[in-house]
Image: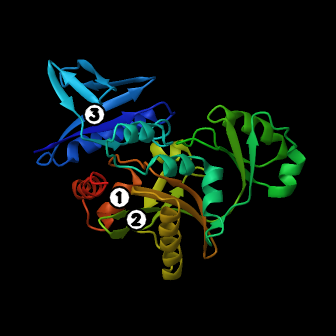
Amino acid sequence: MKKNIAIMAGGDSSEWQISLGSASQIEKIIDRSKYNAYKVTLRNGRWYHTSEDGSEWDVDRNDFSLTVKNEKIKFDYALILIHGTPGEDGRLQGYLDMMKIPYSSSGFFASAITFDKSACKRAVSGTGIHLAKEILLAKDTEIDTKQIVEKLGLPMFVKPNASGSSFGVTKVKSEEQLIPAIEEAFKESDHVIIEEFIEGREVSCGVMVAGGKEYIFPVTELICDTEFFTYEAKYQGASREVTPAQLPDNVTKALNKATLLAYKTLGCRGVARVDFIIKGDTPYMIEINTVPGMSAASIIPQQAAAMGMNMTELFNIIIDDTINR
């Protein structure tokens, strides 16, 4: 009997429309011989499915079901494609855990930790993974710009600490730019992380452990027309992505080791993407994405294709592994 799958998209972050693009792509490739798939949009507190005729049907969150034209559909599984809150920060996972509904991403605790950039770095510190120096600010923190510059140097990066997007990220080149950059980052998150600038090559590494097997995806190098991997670079064509990246074998091995170590240390499951800056031959971990983009132009689909796996196969592996947990 086919399983009923909710492809969960949208959300309340600045990337909600990107999430809808990922969901539309997955709707096309999901294995219809095994699953009945329904896209469920989460937006501003509402959960709903849109039929082919454009009519909208609300999800009953009491039992995670959908009733369309008097036909009740009880969901057996949630395929999470929401970037940012509530799909990447653990909130949706908490609901699904209480409803005893299996899902495709990391669990509540791993999602919450990885979404918080500073907490994520603390969780992997001491494992041998190299990390940039940082300062974490709360909204009521007294800001001493001179002290920040003395500790981290210039340039530096100012980022929202808990955000699933590139919004609110600024490369700060002078002390005078710090306060406006911090104010911009606070628009996206209650805490701001300021990190030292590490000059090097930016790469992204896909990873998945499923069915007792470790899948290390080919490394992608991100070559940007912008100064760093901004929203424009990600989604508006201001970057070139090379998969597999042309790297020395020792660097690729170091990246693969650090990627798998981060994934396992943080207790991730499903597919994840870990981003690094390579300085010399040393990878520095930037962050981990537990709900990576899945549109045709996204990095994970490119990496899967480079290792000879199509997206239908990839999601069959993810669903088969997580549906039994």
* Disc number placed over residue 302 in the picture, else none: 1
The tag earlier along the polypeptide, 3 or 2, is 3
Looking at the image, do the residues carrying marks 1 and 2 touch, with CB atoms under 8 Å apart? Answer: yes
Q: Nearer the viewer, mark 3 or mark 1?
A: 3
| Residue type marked 1 | Gln
Which residue was labeled with disc 2?
Answer: 243
* Applied colour scheme: rainbow
Q: Badge 3 local density, few (<14 within 10 Å), some, or many (20+)?
A: many
The span from disc 3 to disc 2 (Cα, nearest Å) is 30 Å
Is 61 placed left or right of 222 in the picture? left
Tell me the SS state at disc 1. helix
Is 268 placed left or right of 178 in the picture? left
Quarter of the image that includes the N terminus: top left
Instruction: Looking at the picture, tell me which residue is in the foreground, 97 or 3.
Output: 97
Q: Quadrant of residue 168?
A: top right
The tag earlier along the polypeptide, 1 or 2, is 2
Q: Badge 2 local density, few (<14 within 10 Å), some, or many (20+)?
A: many
Q: Residue furthest bottom?
A: 250
Q: Badge 1 local density, few (<14 within 10 Å), some, or many (20+)?
A: many
| Residue type marked 2 | Thr
User: Which residue appears at 53% of the width and 64% of the height?
Assistant: 265
The span from disc 1 to disc 2 (Cα, nearest Å) is 7 Å
The span from disc 3 to disc 1 (Cα, nearest Å) is 23 Å
Q: Quadrant of residue 299?
A: bottom left
Is residue 227 visible in the rendered structure shown here? no
Position in image of residue 294 (x %, y %) = 35, 48
Q: Nearer the viewer, mark 3 or mark 2?
A: 3
Position in image of residue 215 (x %, y %) = 36, 68
User: Which residue appears at 61% of the width and 34% of the height?
Assistant: 188
